Amino acid sequence: MPLSPPQDSLIDDLVLANKILHRYGIVDGYGHVSARLDSNAGNFLLSRSKAPALIERTDIRVHDFSGAMHGDGAPYLERFIHSEIYKARPDVHSIVHSHSQGSIIFGVTGRRLRPIYHMSGFLGSGSPIFDIGDVMGDSDLLVSSPELGGALATTLAGQSCALMRGHGMTVVGASIQEAVFRAVYTEKNAQMQLQAGRDGDIKYLSPGEAELTAALMARSIDRTWQLWVKEAEHDRHGS
Ligand SMILES: [Zn+2]
């Protein structure tokens, strides 16, 4: 069946998501964000391999759940993070993968990343850690095959964020806006948890508080998204 053209607005939001994630230090030259294509079951949108801040509409490519990229250019080596999580999680419509500093620190110490304030209740009872060494021994640490992507999806299970030992994190959401929101606030939570931990014992959100605050914040994500879009557009056009 031929692919129907992706919605323009979805492509626009994906381009903006790349720029916002770069602006907030979640991605640098590396890292990526994708969006499920509801109009073409079994497909998702992801840029060809490029630094996120430089991505434009013409770089966005349709990928299928085998990890194959349709169109010219080189694909990201780690596109299987996206294909395998979309397969495993029908509720997920957008995925962010990053090598942010806080996620690396928690991924290697084994300390659980837990919600310390209302903005990060989506972290629930704490993020699981995917250790690629448990799956294949010594490796280059990249999730560069369907098997590794599947193992990551298994570790993520029903949660919103999985840390990746010695590598970074993968965060999911029901929309591009939610995935970006969660990626930004996961990193903020990590930095604050580190800082607070130096001063004593931390009282984390209880599981009930995490659930209630996650539901509350999910309803107002658009407010933050509008601000971030404005900032990203100002960076691009200076107006
Ligand atoms: Zn990576």
Image: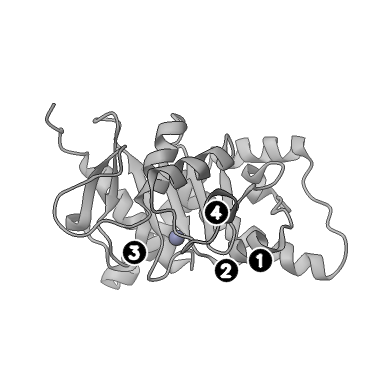
Q: Earlier in the sequence, mark 2 or mark 1?
A: 2
Q: Is residue 100 visible?
A: yes
| Residue 82 vs residue 206, the one in the foreground | 82
Q: CA distance from mark 1 to mark 3?
A: 22 Å
Q: Amino acid at mark 4?
A: Ile
Q: CA distance from mark 3 to mark 2?
A: 17 Å
Residue at 15 percent of width and 33 percent of height:
3
Point 73% across, 66% down: residue: 194
Q: Under 8 Å from ligand 1: the CB of mark 2?
A: no
Q: Residues within 10 Å of mark 4 (few under 14, many from 20)?
A: many
**Residue occupied by mark 2:** 101
Mark 1, other Cα within 10 Å: few <14 / some 14–19 / many ≥20: some
Label 1 sits on residue: 191
Q: Is residue 177 visible?
A: no
Residue behind mark 4 = 132
Pointers 2 and 1 in contact (C-beta within 8 Å): yes
Q: Quadrant of the N terminus?
A: top left
The answer to whether the beta carbon of the residue marked 1 is less than 8 Å from any atom of ligand 1 is no
